[in-house]
Amino acid sequence: MNEQIKFIQGNEACVEGALYAGLEFFAGYPITPSTEIAELLSQLLPQKGGKFIQMEDEIASMCAIIGASLTGHKVMTATSGPGFSLKQEAIGYACMAEIPCVIVNVQRGGPSTGNPTHVSQGDVNQARWGTHGDHAIIALTASNHQDVFAITVDAFNLAETYRTPVVLLFDEVVGHMREKLVVPEKGEIAIVDRLRTSVGKGVDYHPYLPREDGRLPMSDFGGDHRYNVTGLFHDMWGFPSNDPKVVKDLLHHLVDKIETNVNIISRYKEHYLEDAEYIMISYGSSARSAIHMARHRREKGEKIGVLELQSLWPFPEAVVREKCAGAKAVIVVEMNMGQVMRQVKACVDRPETVFLANRIDGKLITPTNIKGILRVIQGRGV
Amino acid sequence: MERIRLVFTGSGGQGVITAAIILAEAAVIFEGMNATQTQTYGAAARGGSTRSDIIISDSEIYFPEVEQPNILVCLTQEAYTEYSSIIRPGGILLTDTRFVTTAKKVDAKQIQLPMYETVMEKIGKPIVFNICVLGALLGISGILKPESVMEVIKTRVPVDFVAMNNRALDIGLVLGANR
C-alpha cells in the first residue's frame, strides 16, 4: 500500500496540507462542518511536537492563534459560519498588527446557526468585510482534495509573505466528501518560513520598520526583544499613535501590501476555456458541477468552459476581465445570492452579459440545474 | 473501467456508510482508480435513514453525487420505497430478503438475497452484515477484486475481527455469485 495515496475527506486534506506547511499550533472550537479538522489535529499535532488546544469558544481560539503566531509559530484555526462571525474582531486585530495566521471556514448555510449540515457559499463577502474598517485580506478556496492540500500550503506561505490573516473558504461538500489525495513529497511544494529579524539581542528592534523591500522581519515575542503590539494605529515601535501621517501611512501600507500584489496572489484554473463562447465562473464545490457540465457540453461540440477561481480576495479582476472579454455570456455558478457575480459584473467590460446560476437550498448545485439556467440565457427556453 | 455509479441506502447503524467508504477506498488505494464518496449528512444516527453515493472511474470525477445509479442497494423497506425509482434503466437493485419486500415494478435487475439471515446463521453477529452486502455486490458485479476490499477492511477493524469480516465477505461473494 502506497502511504502517499490517501482516500480521505476534504477536511482531512486540509489538515495534511497544514502539517506539510509546518503548522505548529492549532486552537479551535469544534463546529459542523469543520469538526474533522480539529478532531484530526488533536490527534496528529501532539505526535509531531505541536500544540492543540480546544478553547472555550471561537473568539478565544482566534486570540490564541494570534498570540502563538507572535511567538514564532505557524498557526491555524478552523470553524464554520457562526464561529467565523465570532472571530471577526480578532481577525481585524491580526490585520492591524500584521500577524500571520490561517483561518479555515468550512461554509454551511447561514445567516445565524442556519443550516449546519448543508452546503453553502454565503460567506464570501464576510471573508472580505467581516471585520470593520478599511483593510485588505487574502481568501482562497478549492474544489478538490489535491487543490485543498496545495491551497492550504499556499495559505500558510501567503500569511508569512504578507504578514496577514489568510482565510481558507471551503464548503461542506468539499469538506465532507471523500476522494483521492496524493500527498506530495517533502520539498515538492515550496514552503515560506517566518522572516525573522537579524537584529541581535540587546539591540533596539523596530517591529514595524520595513526593510528596503517593504517587508517587516519579526522577532519571536517573549524572546530577544521587547516590543509593543496593539490594535491601535501605531508607529514603527508598535506604540499607539493618532498622528495623521502615521495613521494614513499605516492604512496605505495595510491595503497596498496585498492589493498591489493581486496579480501575484491570484490563483485560478482554466477548464475548456480556449475559444469558449459561454464562460462559467465558479469556485469550491459548485465548480465541480460547472466543470462536469462543460465537459459533457464540449463532447457535443458546444463552446463552453469554466474559469475556476481559487483566490477570491483580493478579487482577481484583471484575470476575470481578460478571460471574459470575448464571451457571449458569463455565468457565475455559486451557492449564494450572487456574491461573486457582483464582483464579476463590476470588472467585466459588458456587465449586462453576466448571469447568476445559483442554488441556495442547502443542496449542491447540479449540472442539470446549470444546464436549465443556461438554456434560458441562450434563449432556448426551459 | 467505465464510470460506475452506486447508491447505498439503509438505516443508521447498518453500516451503509462504512461499506460505501470501504468500497471507494479499495478502488482508489488498491486498484488505482478514482472514486468519490458522499453521504447525506444530518442528525440521523442509529435508526435514521442514510444514503451514500459512490462514483468509481478511471477518469476525473467532478460532480460527486449520483442521480441515476447503475447499482442501488436498499437495506430497508423505507429506503426501497424512497429510492427504487432512481435506478438507471437496466441497472442492478440489490435488496435483503429480511428487510425488503420488493413490490414495485422497476426497470432494473432486482436481486433479493438472504444476506442478513445467512450472516446470522453462519456467524451470528449482525455487525458484519454490511461486509456481507459488499461481498454480494462484488459477487454480482465484479466491479473490484475482493482482495482489494479485504485489504481496506484490515486497516479499519481490530485484528481480532479480521477473520470474521473475511468470512462475511466470502458468504456475500458466494450468495452474489450463485444468485
Image: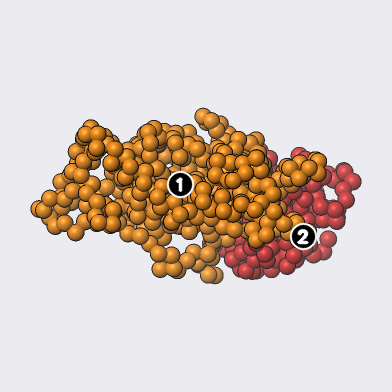
Residue drawn at x 55%, y 41% is: A346
Q: Determine if residue A35 is in view.
A: no
Q: Residue furthest top?
A: A112
Q: Chain of mark 1?
A: A
Q: How many neighbours does mark 1 have within 10 angstroms: few (below 14), some (14-19), or many (20 or more)?
A: many
Q: How many neighbours does mark 2 have within 10 angstroms: few (below 14), some (14-19), or many (20 or more)?
A: few
Judging by the rendered image, the residue that carries numbered circle 1 is A314
Residue drawn at x 80%, y 40% is: A382
Q: Is residue B139 above or below residue A222?
A: below
Residue A281, how many percent across, how many down? 61, 49
Sequence-first tag of 2 and 1: 2
Q: Which chain is orange?
A: A
Residue A110, how many percent across, how many down? 55, 33
User: Which label was assigned to residue B32?
Assistant: none
Q: Nearer the viewer, residue A322 or B160?
A: A322
The reply, left or right, for residue B75 in relation to residue A262 is right
Q: Is residue A117 above or below residue A286?
A: above
Judging by the rendered image, the residue that carries numbered circle 2 is A301
Residue A94, how many percent across, how many down? 33, 41
Q: Amino acid at mark 2?
A: Gly
Q: Nearer the viewer, residue B73 or A18?
A: A18
The reply, left or right, for residue A70 in relation to residue B51 is left
Q: Amino acid at mark 1?
A: Pro
Q: Report, in whole angstroms, how far the alpha carbon at label 2 lies from the one at label 1.
A: 35 Å
Q: Chain of mark 2?
A: A
Respond whether the residues carrying marks 2 and 1 are from the same subunit: yes
Q: Determine if residue A241 is in view.
A: yes
> Mark 2 falls on what kind of element?
loop
Residue drawn at x 9%, y 53% is: A202
